[in-house]
Amino acid sequence: MGEHVQAPFGNFATVRRAVEIPEQLVGPVADALKNWDARAAESVLYVDTDPEKADTAVFSAAYDVPLDVSANCVVVAAKRGGTTTLAACLALAGTRVDVNTAVRKQLDARKASFAPLETAVAESGMEYGGITPVGLPAAWPLLIDAAVPEVPFVLVGSGRRRGKLVLPGWALAALPGAVLLPALATPNPAL
């Protein structure tokens, strides 16, 4: 393995460069890193974490990670006529994705909603609670709230409930299919 690495925030016992541990990643994530721009792929860190603490609020408290450096990736299903389009949306953890307006309009759909759990898991090849923008199906649009790439380093899922990825905000904007939207997310008053 390479030199010792440290996460730019949080309290993690194990931090590795994700490209050095493909066997610990789900297939789509490992493949994405292998085929991505070398500079971007090398910037991705993997932090090992307890899968029982994967939910955002619990994770933030357990690992001392502020919500403003965490981003959640949700899968949406947009429908128009008899066609359903799956897409992923990435927004900072202290916000919520505007599915009914921003997502629906961007995907030119009559109706948009969060995709059923079974569909999101089966189609992404990732675990519920760990879906990440790294390694999504090529046909999916990746809608990213414009605030996300402004964050120097962002924590996202790893594709599994165990572990997370930490990478520069600019790298998220460079993912295949990424579309930056200035009003994709709104503040979440519940947080």
Image (cartoon, helix red, strand yellow):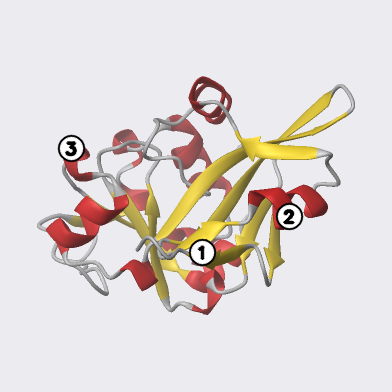
Residue beneath the point at 47% across and 46% down: 132
Residue beneath the point at 42% across and 65% down: 189
Mark 2 is surrounded, within 10 Å at the Cα level, by few (under 14), some (14 to 19) or many (20 or more) other residues, namely some
Q: Quadrant of the N terminus?
A: bottom left
Residue wearing tag 1: 40
Position of residue 152 measured from the top left corner of the image (x, y, whole percent): 43, 79
Q: Whole-Å distance between the Cαs marked 3 and 2?
A: 33 Å
Position of residue 182 measured from the top left corner of the image (x, y, whole percent): 68, 72
Give the amino acid type for the residue marked by disc 2 in the picture: Thr
**Which quadrant of the view contains residue 78?**
top right
As rendered, which of 188 and 85 lies closer to the eye?
188
Could you tell me which secondary element the residue under label 3 belongs to?
Answer: helix
Give the amino acid type for the residue marked by disc 1 in the picture: Ala
**Which quadrant of the view contains residue 6?**
bottom left
Give the amino acid type for the residue marked by disc 3 in the picture: Glu
Residue at the extreme left: 13
* Whether residue 138 can be seen here: no
Residue wearing tag 3: 52
Could you tell me which secondary element the residue under label 2 belongs to?
Answer: helix
Q: Whole-Å distance between the Cαs marked 1 and 3?
A: 29 Å
Residue wearing tag 2: 101
Mark 3 is surrounded, within 10 Å at the Cα level, by few (under 14), some (14 to 19) or many (20 or more) other residues, namely few
Dot 2 or dot 1: first in sequence order is 1
Position of residue 158 measured from the top left corner of the image (x, y, whole percent): 37, 45
Mark 1 is surrounded, within 10 Å at the Cα level, by few (under 14), some (14 to 19) or many (20 or more) other residues, namely some
Residue at the extreme right: 81
Residue 181, labelled with which disc?
A: none
As rendered, which of 157 and 182 lies closer to the eye?
182
